[in-house]
Image (spheres, rainbow, N blue to C red):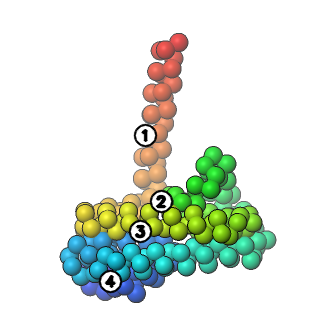
Amino acid sequence: MLFDFLMQHFSYGVLFAWSLMEGEIGLALAGYKVQLGQLRPEYVLAIAISGAIIGDFTIFMIGRLFKSKTEIMLRQHQKRLEHIEEWFRNYGSWIIVFERFIYGTHIPALLMIGASGFSFLKFLLLDIVGVVLWAVTFTTVGFVFGQAVIDILTVVQRHLTIVILVAFFLFVIYQLHIVDKEAEAE
């Protein structure tokens, strides 16, 4: 039902609005509509990229201009903030390129980066790279897999907790397997 509504009312304007914050489902839907010949791929990418860059710039600047209020707000999500800080320590500036692909960290990461005093020019260049990768990836996925990927993304976003728990469970099993291999090697 929701999918049918989206298919009937989806347009370039909706894609732009969806891209301002996060928009994997919107991009996948746009890719599917490109496959159906209802949207043009160059318009989809240009609109998604420009919307995402404007949204990211806005969130970054909110973090920068309202640093003390941003820090207070981020402390309310201390666990998520600690994960983002750890990622920054481990991966440095590359986190700006790939944070869009980590569901639920996009806005807090941009606020934190803005409040941190990070170089605006460096942020903008890395963000453009990340946004282009994001737009091309999810538009292509929607184009290739169509409605099936939109259904999967919808279920994943709706049931993210279950997905995270399953991923965590698989990670623990993998780590235990590595520990067993190391123990056998000794």
Name the kind of residue labelled 2 in the image.
Phe
Q: Residue furthest top?
A: 186
Say few, some or many: other residues with alpha carbon within 10 Å of mark 1 (under 14 / 14 to 19 / 20 or more).
few
Task: Measuring from the top left, give residue 13's x and y in whole percent.
Answer: 40, 87
Residue 170 - label:
1
Q: Measured along the vertical axis of the image, is residue 137 above or below residue 170?
A: below
Per the image, the residue denoted by label 4 is 10
Q: CA distance from mark 3 to mark 2?
A: 11 Å
Task: Measuring from the top left, give residue 105's x and y in whole percent.
Answer: 56, 61
Residue 67 visible in the snapshot: yes
* Residue 64, quarter of the rendered image: bottom right
Task: Measuring from the top left, give residue 128's x and y in whole percent.
Answer: 53, 68
Say few, some or many: other residues with alpha carbon within 10 Å of mark 4 (under 14 / 14 to 19 / 20 or more).
some
Name the kind of residue labelled 4 in the image.
Phe
Q: CA distance from mark 4 to mark 1?
A: 37 Å
Determine whether label 4 and label 1 are within 8 Å by CB.
no
Q: What residue do we see at 46% from left, 82% from top?
A: 17
Q: Nearer the viewer, mark 1 or mark 3?
A: 3
Determine whether label 3 and label 2 are within 8 Å by CB.
no
Per the image, the residue denoted by label 2 is 101
Name the kind of residue labelled 3 in the image.
Ala
Q: Nearer the viewer, mark 3 or mark 4?
A: 3
Determine whether label 1 and label 2 are within 8 Å by CB.
no
Per the image, the residue denoted by label 3 is 135
Name the kind of residue labelled 1 in the image.
Leu
